[in-house]
Amino acid sequence: MRETSRVQVLEPVREQRAIEMPVFGSLLGTMRGARAFWPLIPLAAPGVATISLRGETSALALAAFSALVVLALLIPAVVWWLRRSIPWKALAELAGKSPFSELSLPPEGLFSVGRKMYFALPDAGWAEARLPKAARLQLGAQRRIWLLGPDEQGRRFLQLPGLLWPYRVKTVPSLPEDAVRLDVVEQRIVPPEEDVVLIAHRQRIVRGIRALFAAGVVALGLLVAIQVVMIVEDVSRLQSGLVMMAIFWLVVLIVGYDAAKGMLKPLPRGKWSELVAVPYGPPRLGASGLATIGCRIQWPDGRWSDALLSKVDPALAANVFGTQRLWVVGEAFRGATTFAGVPGHAVLGRVRFN
């Protein structure tokens, strides 16, 4: 745990194996499991439809064409994802035997080229890390990172203070000629509507949610289109399998929207509210990689009540567990459901107060 600009965040402990960091070991196990099959989900609807339509010429052609289109779109996406994704097995093996090492960057020691950040490594060469906007902004203000590795193949991984998600680090011999030196940004607690790290992180979350819903709508549309073609040809050719798949995707969209609509709401304005939070136990991670943690909250008037953070960023749950502090975006009220995060960090989720 470290206090930065009056904000306590969870961080690795020096000389301690990386996997022993709270929640980090569970995250590694989860990401090596069910998450590896997620890229196959978009093929489910057209794939099942194609297999189930034996002998149905026109509908079968439409289903097969739909599957080929999805496959043509999916393969480049999977290739892109594999090139930039984390090798979770290698990371877990490295985390099981090696500790994170802290690296503080000098004021003039951080450079960027687009989404790539560059800084000098302690041994030799330069580190190249592709980071999302929120992480780049956080790094530019903090100038401090945690490095894991290298392993036998020279792979390194980067983790920012207060976060759990690792990023791949590539070693390059020299700094690119078009690299731009980043000026030092004053790190201080500002209202949520001025917190550029928080705003950028929320924008990325919203884009991800909308992309998932778009994929679900496309899958549902393909199934409905196939069934409509069959009914137009012969009203008696109603395929129960297609209907069940369409109903399944419709239910998934409805349930998913109900679960995600809170994250689509605008952030409250005002200030950050810091509350004492005593967890009932360590966070629980689901197959989706999201965490759930319950805790007791002490209000400014001294009273206590329960709070639940369900299906949130594991970094948010880990910070609550490690620091016993909960930062609420805007004013906190009993009985409300609102946003929680960490000022100046790419951490955000929803909390419900009882």
Image (tube, rainbow, N blue to C red):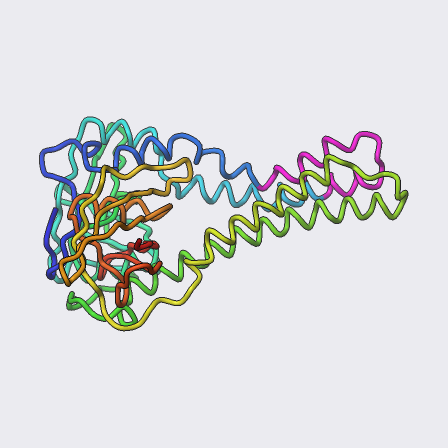
Q: Is residue 44 magenta?
A: yes
Q: Residue furthest right?
A: 234
**Disc count in the image?**
0
Q: Is residue 38 magenta?
A: no
Q: Is residue 172 visible?
A: no
State the image coordinates of residue 14 (x, y, percent, origin top left): 9, 38
State the image coordinates of residue 290 (x, y, percent, origin top left): 37, 43
Q: 71 or 313, which is in the foreground?
A: 313
Left or right relative to 90: residue 19: left
At 15% from the left edge and 34% from the top edge, which residue is drawn? 99
Q: Is residue 293 visible?
A: yes
Residues rendered magenta in the picture: 42-65
Q: Residue furthest front?
A: 303
Relative to 226, residue 105 above or below: below
State the image coordinates of residue 17 (x, y, percent, origin top left): 16, 31
At 62% from the left edge and 52% from the top edge, which residue is drawn? 217
Q: 342 or 170, which is in the foreground?
A: 342
Q: Quadrant of residue 72?
A: top right
Q: Quadrant of residue 267?
A: bottom left
